[in-house]
Amino acid sequence: MHQVIASPQGDKFVIACPGARKGMQIPRAMHQELSGAVSDGHKVPGWLAEAARQAWGLELSGRPAKGNVLVRPLTPLNYSRATWEINKGCNFNCEHCYLAERKFEGLPREEKDRLLLMLRDAGVLWMQFTGGEPTIDRDFVHSYRYAYGLGMLIEILTNGSRLHRPDVIELFSSMRPHKVTVSLYGATAESFDSLTRKPGAYKLLMKGLKAAKESGIPLELVLIITKHNSHEIAAMREIAEEYAQAYTEYSNISPTYNGTAEPLAAQAPGLLDKSTIFQGCPAGHTFFHVDPHGFATMCKIGRENPISLMAEGLDGLLRLPAIADAQMLRSGGCSGCELSASCRVCRPLAKAYQEAKAPLNTYCQHGNGDDAA
């Protein structure tokens, strides 16, 4: 299996190592040299062997390029990242979930392979498996191996309930993910199981965190702050510091992506995160989302005018930038807002809040007494 990946990224070329954060940029000529070395049966070029040794401690000197270096093809498309809901089904029933429905359904295995090949050919290097809970999909292990073999750097967004399983540990140990991001819903079984509405969920999570740490699998934790666990923030941070390489905190509970309000009941009063001003994002231009049936949208929230990749192929993605731009217009309830320059909510998410008739203080500065300054 390959040790490093050489990939075009827009008008640039990069080299990455699965499981490592550090990468490097190379000129087009070096990418072409690597492609030739692989196809002609040559050894890894000296410059790459030295760079890999310094960056990642890999020993590639004298080794054949084929099998050690995976060279991804050039693509006319400019996408570098994608998220894929392999299945919306989940073994938890979280009160705050943004999904409108959590059905166990999706593409058959052969179509999953065809979709992943299309994502590779669209330029996707950073690939996030999400759900639902991705690890419970019957084809998760197969699809992970296939995506890895296509030269994708993989992130798993998971509730951690299956991290302890030997097949999952073996998979992540033999084919290193870029990272595994685990949601933390509390620091005790009482709070955790209350939010997930799954008896025993906390026990499964902790079992998974311990197994991953023992196996050296890179973890990041997302601390989901709600009314169930806001009193445990310090303890949640301690768990994150023990088991994760990094962690973030998230308290902005959103409606479902189609604008129903049920998840807002879990939001902790007074803990709306106001740290980041929204300054635009590349959704629909260099990044996109795919649902379990192969429909591409700008992101997980902005799902208007979905494009069927299974029916249209990659040509369908040519329409996505315009679809994304239309959804990002400040219109409807946000039209003419005097605080738009310092708003912290993107337009598709604001629309979901408005359709859910959410109180302004759950997402908007107007509802918190903020001013334009």
Image (cartoon, helix red, strand yellow):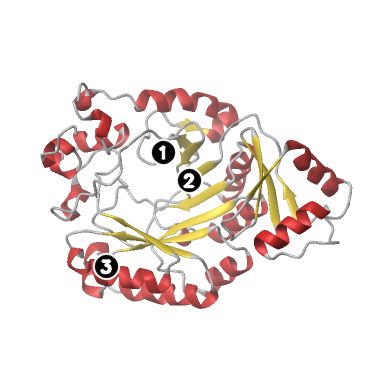
Q: Nearer the viewer, mark 2 or mark 3?
A: 3
- Indicate left or right for 41 with 254 as reference: right
Looking at the rendered structure, the kind of residue marked 2 is Thr
- Quarter of the figure with residue 247: bottom left
The residue that disc 2 covers is 83
- Indicate left or right for 367 with 168 as reference: left
User: What residue lies at 40% left-to-right and 68% top-to-bottom?
Assistant: 161
Mark 2 surroundings: few (<14), some (14-19) or many (≥20) residues within 10 A: many
Whether residue 142 is visible to the viewer of this picture, yes or no, is: yes
Q: Position of residue 221 (x, y in %)?
A: 39, 62
Label 2 sits on a secondary structure element that is strand
State the CA–CA distance, disc 2 to disc 1: 8 Å
Mark identifier at residue 274: none
Cβ–Cβ under 8 Å for marks 2 and 1: yes
- Indicate left or right for 5 with 224 as reference: right
221 up-or-down from 30: above or below? below
Given residues 174 and 8, the one toward you in this image is: 8
User: What residue lies at 76% left-to-right and 58% top-to-bottom?
Assistant: 50
Mark 1 surroundings: few (<14), some (14-19) or many (≥20) residues within 10 A: many
Cβ–Cβ under 8 Å for marks 3 and 1: no
106 up-or-down from 211: above or below? above
Q: Position of residue 193 (x, y in %)?
A: 25, 69
User: What residue lies at 44% left-to-right and 77% top-to-bottom?
Assistant: 210
Label 1 sits on a secondary structure element that is loop
Mark 3 surroundings: few (<14), some (14-19) or many (≥20) residues within 10 A: many
The residue that disc 3 covers is 186
Q: Quadrant of the N terminus?
A: bottom right
Looking at the rendered structure, the kind of residue marked 3 is Gly
Mark identifier at residue 299: 1
- Quarter of the figure with residue 171: bottom right
